[in-house]
Amino acid sequence: MMQVMLPYRTDWRSVMSMLDYVKGKGADRPTLEARLGTGESFRETLNTAEQLGMVEREESGEIRLTSSGQQIAYASTDAERRHELALALCRYAPYRVPFERALQESLRVIDGPSVEQTWQVNMRLGQPRNRVEEARTFFFRLADEAGLGAFRRGVRGQPTRLELVDRFHSLMPELLRETDGEPEVAEAPDPPISDSPPIGSAPSALTLSPPAGPAGVSMEIHVDMTDWDLDRIEAFLDMIGMRARPEQE
């Protein structure tokens, strides 16, 4: 799984330029750098496209569009491109989780401090603080490009935030379903592990100890009885005439 490096220090226009250039056969990094420039801006644009699942690097070093990247790069209308971008954002866990929270809590605004708490406390991404501050702004800008809300920079005591569009709460469930990213339901904790099998159940395995052979030689046979019932186990033991004892941990 790719290490999470929150996208920042680029913009959607630069990402689109990269997607456009790797259409078709793709391109290697030196070719892209010659076309799009080098330095931090290029690195972060490439990181953004990779993090959001729009491009992938092959073993040969070629950078190619993924299926998601193709849908975005070849979109025939702005509306289609916004929809595909929204899907890409919902597939990316650091973006999906704040969307899910806004949906579950019927929020009208996603603010910067809540996103920082989600990333650093709830998800424990362990990103540098300066990266988090810039990354959440970039997140809001991308969501604005995708038609999910309006980016608002913090002024006069107001935090930097994303003001969600009116149809967000009807649109987001559809996006999550399309990306198999519906809000997760916490699983019930596993019951305590007991050393003793339930009453009336067969042990999952037995170690069979046959009588000692010539010159005191002995052996143990391990038999997996996971799918056996008690009658079958007893018949087996009677047939081979061996004593059975539960396997010790």
Image (cartoon, rainbow, N blue to C red):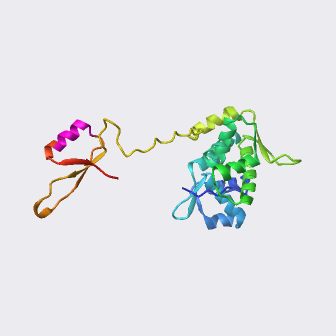
Location of residue 77 (image quadrant): top right
Q: Is residue 231 magenta?
A: yes
Q: Residue furthest left?
A: 214
Compared to residue 133, the image places residue 183 above or below, namely above
Residue 233's spot in the image, x, y percent? 22, 41
Q: Quadrant of residue 146?
A: top right
Residue 73 seen in the current view: no
Q: Is residue 139 magenta?
A: no
Q: Is residue 3 left or right of residue 120?
A: left
Tally of numbered tags: 0
User: Residue at image x 72%, y 51%?
Assistant: 116
Front one among 131 and 22: 131
Q: Main secondary structure of the magenta part?
A: helix
Horizontal relation, residue 29 to residue 216: left or right: right
Give whichever of 67, 43 is nearer the camera. Answer: 43
Q: Quadrant of the N terminus?
A: bottom right
At 70% from the left and 49% from the top, the residue drawn is 117
Image location (x, y in percent) of residue 122 = 64, 49
Which residue appears at 80% of the width and 48% of the height? 160
Nearest the eye: 35 or 152: 152
Whole-percent x, y for residue 127 in the image:
67, 58
Can residue 6 be seen?
yes
Range of residues picked out in magenta: 228-237
Horizontal arrangement in the rendering, residue 99 relative to residue 220 (left or right): right
Q: Tell me where residue 188 appears, x and y as whole percent.
A: 52, 39
